[in-house]
Image (cartoon, rainbow, N blue to C red):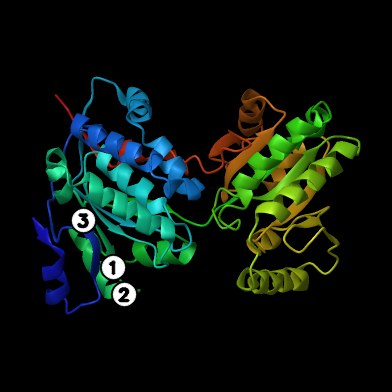
Amino acid sequence: MLSLEAVAMFRNHKNIKIIFGTSQIENNSSVIFDDEILNFLGVLSEKILNNKEAKKFPDLFTLGFWCRKSNLIKLKKDYNSEDFRLGRGLVLHITPSNVPLTFAYSLIFGLISGNSNIVRLPSKNFEQVKLLIQILSLVLKKKKFTFIKKRFVLIKYKNSDDISEYLSKIVDGRLVWGGDKTVSKFKSFVTSPRCVDLFFANRFSVCLINIKSLNKLKDIEIKKLCNKFYNDSYLMDQMGCSSPLIVFWLGSKESKYKEKFWNFFSQIVNEKYDFDLSASNKKISNLTKLILNEKNLKPKYDRFNLLRINFKHLSERSINLNPHYGSFYEVKIDNLKKLSPYINKKLQTLIYFGFKKKELKNLIINEKIKGVDRFVPFGRAFDLNTKWDGYDIILNLSRIIAD
């Protein structure tokens, strides 16, 4: 049993704030995909999906759909083996400040892998986070879920190396979602000898479109494709590591359907995207840095909320200078092999249209490419799963009991 309040007092850190959960969290383990945990998550899913306010937040509604009991049972089948697996104990989750619900997925990963969890919430006060905590509170009022209250706590604290270092010492595992600086900082902290770490550092993602396949689509089908692309890219201002930055067009000839795609997409952006003054200023600042690095840029835009920048040769530095907020680098290639020079270890997700997954897998194998951890079709960029950034989270956060 661990008292976070006692930790705060002992370390003289009064700025550990418990947002939800108990100050008395158990450090224990259960079997992976425990039935009681799945029952709890199933009820949580129902409450989210039936909440009228939740429907205003696509990311929250997606979370509710993902943690349906039927979906978790389906995931469980991937781990059905003769191995007897238990959670490692107590896991610390450090989640990004700019993505509202990564903390929720991370917590669920911790629970279904059989662990107790200390979860640091985003520093920003997102409305969907507040709503999810309200729904959690309602679910945990049920007597049958009393045991869950001792399995996790949601906290906030301002950046403090002392707090982060102390928490790192007392846990059996850490999930650190953040930029390279955050990862480097947590790597510097001393942990217990058997502490397992999963680090999710800076990544970028790309989109690959087969022009030949696009040419076969009707207007209504192109519009549907554009809506999916909008969800992949704009829902988090292109800040998510799985949001596409580069759009690769595969085809030997120009196509009127390519411009038709962008015209339809521009209409959707103008209708849906709330591009405020703060975002505009940040985009101008980011774009200025890019222009100073790449002096011959010729951007195309309908309005400033959708910016297309054509590259013949795209440098790694330009990739790192992502302007975000609806900025897309465009590169034309005439065969799949031409994609390989742009793929490095930082490339996480390849979103595709007009290809078979086998073609893309063969490219990775034949060209001996070290990058790319995911292939997903349009509209699936934010489908967070138990296999992420090349890790199997459940296997890493649990241990085998050999017999």
Mark 2: amino acid: Ser
Residue positioned 62% across, 23% down in the render? 358
Do the residues bearing badges 2 and 3 touch, measured as CB atoms within 8 Å? Answer: no
Distance from the alpha carbon under mark 1 to that under mark 2: 6 Å
Q: Earlier in the sequence, mark 2 or mark 3?
A: 2
Distance from the alpha carbon under mark 2 to that under mark 3: 17 Å
Distance from the alpha carbon under mark 3 to that under mark 1: 11 Å
Residue indicated by mark 3: 171
Q: Quadrant of residue 282?
A: bottom right
Residue indicated by mark 1: 164
The answer to whether residue 31 is above or below residue 25 is: above
Q: Taking 72 as reference, is 162 left or right? A: left
Of the 4 image quadrants, the one containing the C terminus is top left
Front residue of this view, candidates 375 and 223? 223
Do the residues bearing badges 1 and 2 touch, measured as CB atoms within 8 Å? Answer: yes
Do the residues bearing badges 3 and 1 touch, measured as CB atoms within 8 Å? Answer: no
- Examine the rendering and report whether any part of residue 255 can be seen: no
The numbered mark at residue 147 is: none
Dot 2: element: loop
Front residue of this view, candidates 183 and 136? 136
Of the 4 image quadrants, the one containing the N terminus is bottom left
Dot 1: element: helix
- In the rendered image, residue 133, in percent from the top left (x then y), is placed at 31, 54
Mark 3: amino acid: Val
The answer to whether residue 154 is above or below residue 401 is: below
- Residue placed furthest toward the left: 1
Disc 3: CA contacts within 10 A as few (<14), some (14-19) or many (>=20): many
